[in-house]
Amino acid sequence: MSDFLQLLIAGATTGSIYGLIGLTFTLTYNATKLPNLALGEFVMIGAMLAVLTFSVWKLPMVVAFPFIILAGGACGVLFDRLVTAPMRNAGMPMTSQIMATIAAAIVISSGMAQIAGVRQLGLPAQFQGGVIRMGELSILPQNLAVIVITALIGVGLWLFLSKTRFGLSIVATGYNPTAARLVGIKVSHVFLATFALSAAIAALAGAIVAPIISASAYMGLNIAIKGFIAAVVGGMGRPIFALVGGLVVGICETMMSGYVSSAFNEVITLGLMLAVLMARPTGLLGERT
Amino acid sequence: MSAEATPARRTASIAIQLGIVAVLAALPFLGVPNYIVQLAGSAGIAVIFALGLNLLFGYCGQISFGHAGFYAVGAYGVAILAPMLGYIPALFLALLLGMAVAMLIGFPLLRLRGHYLALGTLAFGIAVEFLALQGGDFTGGPWGLSVDRPVLFGSGMTAAGFYLLILACTVIAFYFAKNLVNSRIGRAMQTIREDEALAMAVGVNTVFFKVAVFGVSGAFAALAGGLYAGLNLYITPDLFDIRLSIGVVVMIVLGGAGTPMGPVIGAVLLTFLPELLHGFHEYAAVIYGLILLLVLRFMPGGIVGLFRKLVRTKPGGNERVVTDAAS
């Protein structure tokens, strides 16, 4: 039983990261209808910046985290201005726009490989301290921090999208960009803001996961795929669904590695996604249409 | 394309095509260095790979970012089956296997909209690479597998012989693809690309066609992979990573998606170009990505599209109407 709970905690940790990435994916997807396949590169940039700020510069946490979040947001702005906005404004077909995001992903990751090399860079946990024990259960502070930060971002984003003016304008743009424009929402600003916000969250996710899985130039795509699968499994309807999807994917994966073998992890997640798509095309939580 | 069907022009066109094939077939016997013949073989393999994806993406409008997965299925299929069956039967079986796998994963993904296909194929490509890496003795793990030198009619094939086999497969693949897109099936595919709802409304079984085309393009990719295994005689999982999947997309987009010649031009260019530019290898991925970005934005019809535009706008030039597939 304690094995099971222990695996559950481990699964919830990786699941939180998948969920966070899925959440940022859904955030831009719902507003712009563009699946951003370069999302993982912002996670990679966050992880790399974490190595830089924590291991090399040895900055305190209160400086390093805001720096990483802001830098991630800035990358999101650049990405929209240089890649997605020109394609969108030129009226290119959606498949071309999707391809542009993946082309950008290749440029970013292989560019980073030129700068930082292809090695896996480790880094000490940002949240130090002894193992926290709860009865039979023990959990590392870093893992707990990942879960708590994910929960906070989930709640924060939900409040932002449902209670603030700007959040509501993002949702409105997603439903109908033309109508949103008619009521005075500046749609191009909304698009820019969702890219900045999702890149900032993705960079933060990269920074807190780096001590657990280490950072490397080519990590982006693999981790992004898990995020996409989380979003598809949970349902693309709302960013919060992706968090649930991420937990499902993460826990399934960890249980399989724990009880069977880790050899087929990628196949399990792919199979899970295909199964969900067959049974419920709108995701586990998505509305039936 | 078939607008000028006067018998004389038709004969001339067939003569030119036969001439090109004859020159290509004579290549190993003209004193061309072996290295160039080997490269031409690689180009042929890339052409087959690109032609298959062009059917799916260029003509049917469905994107795949995991075609390296089918290529790997072909390569590993040949490496594993050839010692038991011989090279040619193994190649044929690998082709069927690639088709079967493509239809199996295509069915759930293609029922949904294009975005799921992009994500699902991306995940598929990574899953195949991972399986090859984790396959133990069956796939040789990270060290990969060596492939027996292909044997035909009881004797080992020479480099020139294998080149001719690749050329034959490339020519068959080219005309198969060309005839397919000019058939009723091809018109159904293009209707799906232009407007899926319209295709359904006029009675095209869109799911069937999409899954079938996905299967055919998977078969092309597996054939290319199987030939690659025979050419290189050694395969490792990292050959089949995401860069290969993107590389083939770049070939099609650069050459001109949805045109018969586009993938041929793109594949040949991108096979020979890196060899011409020394020191290019280090930045290959960055340059590929940048080429793709710039072509997507500024040259959406690729090289063929650009050429057609020039022909059309030249004053007093060829006035025939070209259906612009890429716009």
Image (cartoon, coloured by chain):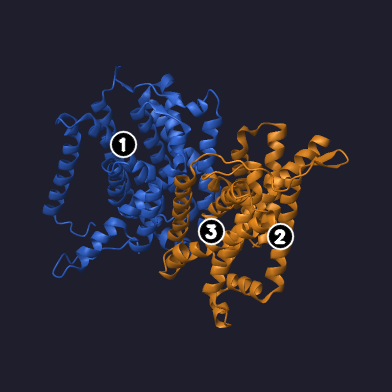
Task: Check residue B277 in the rendering and tell me which mark sits there, or answer none.
Answer: none
**Residue A206 visible, this orientation:** yes
Q: Which residue is mark 3?
A: A35
Of the pair B314 and B215, the residue shown nearer to us: B314
Q: Which residue is mark 1?
A: B42
Q: CA distance from mark 1 to mark 3?
A: 33 Å
Residue at figure coordinates x 56%, y 64% from the top left: A195
**Residue A283 visible, this orientation:** no
Amino acid type indicated by mark 3: Pro
Q: Please determine whether, in this image, residue A58 is positioned above or below residue A77.
A: above
Image spot of residue B225 (x, y percent): 39, 35
Mark 2 or mark 3, earlier in chain: 3
Of the pair A189 and B93, the residue shown nearer to us: A189
Q: Please determine whether, in this image, residue A258 is positioned above or below residue A140.
A: above
Mark 2 chain: A
Task: Check residue A154 in the rendering and tell me which mark sits there, or answer none.
Answer: 2
Q: Does residue B296 appear left or right of residue B106 in this picture?
A: left
Q: Residues within 10 Å of mark 3 (few under 14, many from 20)?
A: many
Give SS at disc 1: helix
Numbered disc in front, either 2 or 3? 2
